[in-house]
Amino acid sequence: MNRIFAFLLLFFSVNVFGQNLQSFEPVELVNPLMGSDSKPSLSNGNTYPAIAVPWGMNFWTPQTGKMGDGWAYTYNADKIRGFKQTHQPSPWMNDYGQFAIMPVTGKLKINQDERASWFSHKAEIAKPYYYSVYLADHDVTAEITPTERAAQFRLTYPKTDSAYVIIDAFDKGSYVKIIPEKRMVIGYSTKYASGDLKNFKNYFVVQFDKDFTINGAWDGAKFYPGKQELESNHTGAVIGFKTKKGEQVNLKVASSFISHDQALLNLERELANDSFEQTKSKAKEIWSERLSRVKAEGGSIDQLRTFYSCLYRTLFFPNKLYELDKNNQIVHWSPYNGKVLPGYMFAGTGFWDTFRALYPFLNLVYPSINKEMQEGLINDYKEGGWLPEWSSPGYSNVMIGNNSASVVADAYIKGMRGYDIEKLYEALKHGANNEGPIDAVGRRGVQYYNSLGYVPYDVKINENAARTLEYAYDDFAIYQLGKALNKPKKELDLYARRSQNYRNLFDKSTGLMRGKNKDGKFMSPFNPFKWGDAFTEGNSWHYTWSVFHDVQGLINLMGGREQFVNKLDSVFALPPIFDESYYNSVIHEIREMQIANMGQYAHGNQPIQHMIYLYNYAGEPWKAQYWVREVLNRLYKATPDGYCGDEDNGQTSAWYVFSSMGFYPVTPATDQYVIGAPLFKKVTIKLENGKQIIINSTDNSEENRYIQDMKLNGADYTKNWLSHSSLMKGATIDFRMSSNPNKQRGIKPESFPYSFSNSNIKK
């Protein structure tokens, strides 16, 4: 009997989890809870389950945290306080344009702590297009399904004469109006966390399909039965009715940053007469189409779940801030001047994170949405005078760099057309040569950078070495775009020279980047394990590699390929020691590096994420192949603790997606991707131009992680990089994988990827 049972179990496993695996829809493999088991002291992603459509204006999420807490949903929480409309890019940035809906029963409880209900993940369903949970204290099942600017709720109540829906418009100034004859509540919230917004209101409309037996507004903790309009610091509405056991009450909800009329128009346009199931089906269809642009095959069920959960995360930010008016014209509320203006607008992303892989990924697989985003950037500049480096939804004073240069240049170089690129080039030059109204716009320390070639350590400008390194790469991006636009040689030479400013911070005595004082002497004492100070959320071991555009130049500074490779090896060989004195505490990024057991490699934060691929520039690509697979295997899982640090608006997910496919954009604003090693036996990318990229590695396995040889369109291919332009024509890439590294492939300089220092060498 035991043998028969074992045979049946094996047969079942092979058929369900083997042969039929690929019949699963990608959208059903996504776990929106990936990364949600996080807290301020340790991030496993710092995500929340975003119930939305790709790049939707509005997301919805169950709210376990207190109102105003950036950790809106945490996996280890026991209670749900409401279901919040959110635009939050990260818990550190917090939210804007938010309000919450909460069904309750029994004695009316308005306060968020009192109305909160116990819930269990065992009675929770989270999908990109649908969320359901049982609220035990109220005996209510709540379901949500989204559109771009609207959503439907389906609330299943018990038999009771005390069934309620609480609408919470949050504090900092809010308004509600109840219209019983229309079964409707309208209102607005003005709560936001970042910037100085003008005329900011998130207008909302909630349409019920059931008559109200009780209604009233509330102010703080006080309920006013029958009061149908109220404006205060913190107001909301209560709608009550009698229900039969199992009765479903449906709500249609929409919002607008423009007006109540526009919110109602958004509701009517996006939900129309659709039932909950029809909206759910449409949302699922949208996700299925977007996720199916990349088809991964030949991996384990866990690898596929992780891949598609990461792909899901790449399709959110920046989210649409624009709407369609009654004439179907694209319009937006401007976070810069408070006016309603024509054209595209997006918000909710930090270029310091996303220039590295997220935007290059959009340029490869979803270029049409990035074209809209580029048009939105033009409006950012016209209305605010600067390009945003962090938008939430206007200029946010966090992080460093001038990395809008990379985002703009990479899009154009990768083929985006049909928008005012000259205006964007003007915006890049303006940002590169001026300090902005806040530290994180334009270039802080630009007068030093342009005159000395670096931002000094001793002039009270924080994170000065990191700024210098990022400005140098950004100058390269401006140079690349200027070259593509046939700008004058004098102008190109200026940015080309500045792109070499990274050299000014290289300390030959340590072989690392180091802060430098105004007088030209390196800062002292120097501890390469010190986080912060001259660097941003990292140390010298992380930032030394931030020479994306001129790795050969860095190799030369280090004394050659052998010394360079030894330095790369040292990142993994060193213990995870650290000096946290700049922060006066161990920040979560430090802790995440410490516990990952990968030495000084801190994949949980962005500055070092490209570093593994640099082995390709020094003739030892097999080491990149080894370490890429290690990171894919060890630091990502489709589980609530599945990331190794902040997910950060799709960037850390885009690293996984790119790396799983077998290549990565080390240098945005060039035409190249650097080869790592594929994770799956086959990946098919459907391009928007109708072509396909097919990546085959049929003998791939856990042991066979090394590339023995590869073919591109049937011909032997020996380079360590692939060109974007050749991929866009459609391509078939065949990898032959092995358990042993091929130490003869990719070892000659003619196989190495682009570096500015040898850009005159034809490849």
Image: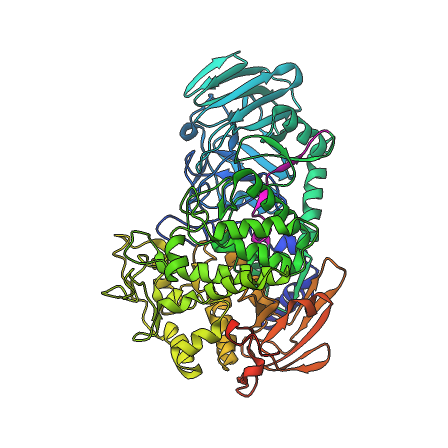
Q: Residue at x 70, y 29 (%)?
A: 268
**Front-most of residues 169 and 462:** 462
- Asked if 245 appears above or below 356 in the picture, the reply is above
Residue at the farthest top position = 226
Q: Would residue 493 be found to the left or right of residue 444 on screen?
A: right
Q: Measured from the top left, where is residue 298 in percent x and y?
A: 64, 69
Q: Which of the 4 image quarters holds residue 257?
A: top right
Q: Residue at x 58, y 79 (%)?
A: 761
- Asked if 90 appears above or below 625 in the picture, the reply is above
What residue span does the magenta drawing correspond to?
Answer: 312-326
Residue 2 appears in the figure: no
Q: Residue at x 47, y 13 (%)?
A: 224
Q: Is residue 321 magenta?
A: yes
Q: Would residue 199 be found to the left or right of residue 220 on screen?
A: right
Q: Would residue 713 be found to the left or right of residue 374 on screen?
A: right
Q: Quadrant of the N terminus?
A: bottom right
Q: Measured from the top left, where is residue 559 in percent x and y?
A: 39, 81
Q: Quadrant of the C terminus?
A: bottom right
Q: Measured from the top left, where is residue 311 in percent x and y?
A: 59, 56
Residue at the farthest bottom position = 744
Residue 417 appears in the figure: yes
**Front-most of residues 579 and 759:** 759
Q: Residue at x 45, y 28 (%)?
A: 115
Q: Is residue 42 magenta?
A: no
Q: Which of the 4 image quarters holds residue 380?
A: top right
